[in-house]
Structure formats: structure tokens, C-alpha cells
Amino acid sequence: MTALSLSPKFARGGALLRAREVGIGVVLVVVFAATTLHNHHFATANSVQQLLSGAALIAILGVGETLVIVTRNVDLSVGSIVGLSAYTVGRLFSHHPGMPVIIGFVIGIAVGAVIGAVNGFVTAALRVPSLVVTLAMLYIVRGVDGLIVNGHIIVPSSIPSAFVAIGFRTFLGIPWLAIIAFAIVVIVAYAMRSFRSGRDLYAIGSNPEAAALAGVPAARRVFTAFVISGSLAGLCGALFLALHAEVDVTAGLGYELLVVSAVVVGGVAIFGGSGTVVGAALGALLLNTINQALVASRVSSFWNEAIAGALLLARPVAEPAGGPRPAVGAGGAP
């Protein structure tokens, strides 16, 4: 018996996943069109670029979060990793003005990878529920970040112009941040669909017992998912610095909830075994579009949180009867 024996279930779910993504796309178009009718400036090139740039970081974080959630786990430490990575890279730039831009990204990714490895080891090897592990890591990293920052702020003048340019420049009218996010989504989506290691993640989340009998190295796959999630969060920290060119102790605050919301709204089953990174990215774009639509319509920003919460609740409630449901005793996901 191999992990491939589980693939017919995934094949049957493929049409459902595509339907979810199409549904999100339809809602996205409707929100954009309705807002444009109310405010024609919403459809300008500058406004669309802001929509794409604003959703890019959450979409990238959503890719890593999806890898974790499909295995019946969750990573709540991504926002704190973004903050620590952003400040670490910014501080290095301020103390080493001649440091190459690429090194900044490497360091950001490394910071996230180390934290992700700790999350993965404690979850997979020590079998501590990921909700507990990553929530604890969120507070630990936030505390460390606060000690390191100590009230200081990374200012734009200390960041290389070539690095900051990545945050606001465009290529053929498309922000570089959106291009980077798109590339990551495409690569990971292809890997999850084409490689056995990617399909193993679905097998683990769909039926852990069957996956074990099929010889799937569950601990190794879960560990890898957390490392990738942490690495992408570290990359987002560097991109956060490039986008805002200014970092303080609040960087990345609350991102973990935005990411989980985007992933679930994007059709990723919170109890594992189902969902795609494409859906997660569309969920991030939808939530950001709704946020900007409320601003363009001069509606109170408090409605943004209410709508996001309603969408987060509506997605699992609307899950088909045959969709994923929590297993008795499952403690990995919230």
C-alpha cells in the first residue's frame, strides 16, 4: 500500500476545490464591480496596485499556513516572525550600510526557518498540539522582539534604496510584491499537486491512520511544512520592511489572524486534508478588497472585522456534508 492509493479521494475532491476557488473569484469580481460603481476611482491603476500590494504579504503567509493546516495543524506564530524578521533585517542594514540586498532576504528567511524548525520539532517529534506550540512561540518571539527593539524604530534613511524599491516599484504595471507572491503560489501549488511529498500532506490531514499504513513519513512532512511556513514568514518580514521602510515593535501584529482567516475563507479545511494555496491567495485578495472597498465607500473600518469574521464562520458552516470534519480527539488544529 502506498500514499498513491489515497489519491482517488483527492481526485474526487479536485472539482470541489476548483468550484470553491471559482466561487471566491466570483465574489471578488462582484465586490470590485459594486465598489467601482459607487466610486469610480476604485478601479484606477493606482488603486488596483494598492489592492495587489496589500494582499501580497498575507497571500505569501497563506501559502505556508496552508501547508500546515492541511496536515491538521496550525501556525499562529507567523505574525511575530514577520515582526522579528523585519526588525532584524532593518537593524543589520542600519549597522552595515553596504550589505547586499540579497543578504537581507537570506537573513529574513533564515530567522523564520529557525523558528519554524522549532515549531515543527516540538509538534512532530514531541507530539505537542501545534495550537499550543505556535501560540507559545507567538508570545516568546513577541517578547524577544520587544527586548531587541527596546523602543527603537528602523527609519527609511537606514534602508538601501534598492531594497525599498521592491516594495513600491512595478513591472508592466504590476507591483513586484504581487509578482513575488504569484510566483510563490504557482510554485507551491505545482509542488503540492505534482510531487509525492506534497500529496503526502493531504494524506496526513485527510486520514492519518491510512497515511501511516501507506508509509507516509508524517513527522518529517509536518516538520517540513512548519519550516516552510516559518521561512515564508521570514521572507514576508523582509518584504514588510521593503514595503513600509519603517519598522517598530508592532510590525506584523495581528497578521496570524488575518492569515488564518484568508486561508479558511479561501477554502482550506481547518481540520485538514483539503484546500489549495491558490484558494488561500484568493482569500487574502478578497479580504483586502473588502477592506479597501469599505474605505472607498466611506464605511466604518469596524465593519471590516465584522465581515471578515462572518466569512470565516460561513466557510466551515457551508462545508459540504462529505467535507472534512474534526476527528474525535484531534488536537492539532483549533
Image: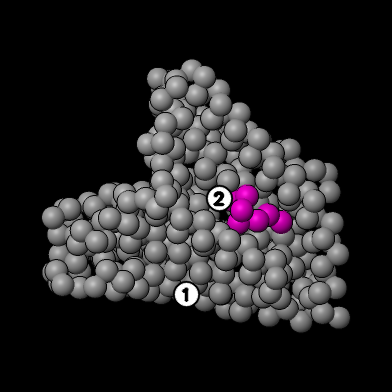
Q: Tell me: 200 left or right of 152.
A: right
Magenta range: 274-280
The crowding category of the residue bearing disc 1, from other C-alpha atoms within 10 Å (few below 14, some 14 to 19, many at least 20), is many
Magenta span includes 112 = no
Name which residue lies at 75% across and 57% down: 327
Instruction: Name the secondary structure under disc 2.
Output: helix
- Tell me if residue 298 can be seen: yes
Q: Judge whether 19 appears above or below 64 on screen.
A: above
Task: Give the residue at mark 2.
Answer: 281
What type is the residue that disc 2 sits on? Answer: Ala
Dividing the picture into quadrants, the one containing residue 196 is bottom right
Q: Nearer the viewer, residue 214 or 329?
A: 214
Q: Position of residue 254 (x, y in %)?
A: 40, 46
Mark number displayed over residue 117 = 1
Residue at the far front in the pictured view = 172
Q: Nearer the viewer, residue 115 or 85?
A: 85
Q: Position of residue 268 (x, y in %)?
A: 65, 51
Q: Position of residue 229 (x, y in %)?
A: 50, 65
Q: Judge whether 19 appears above or below 192 on screen.
A: above
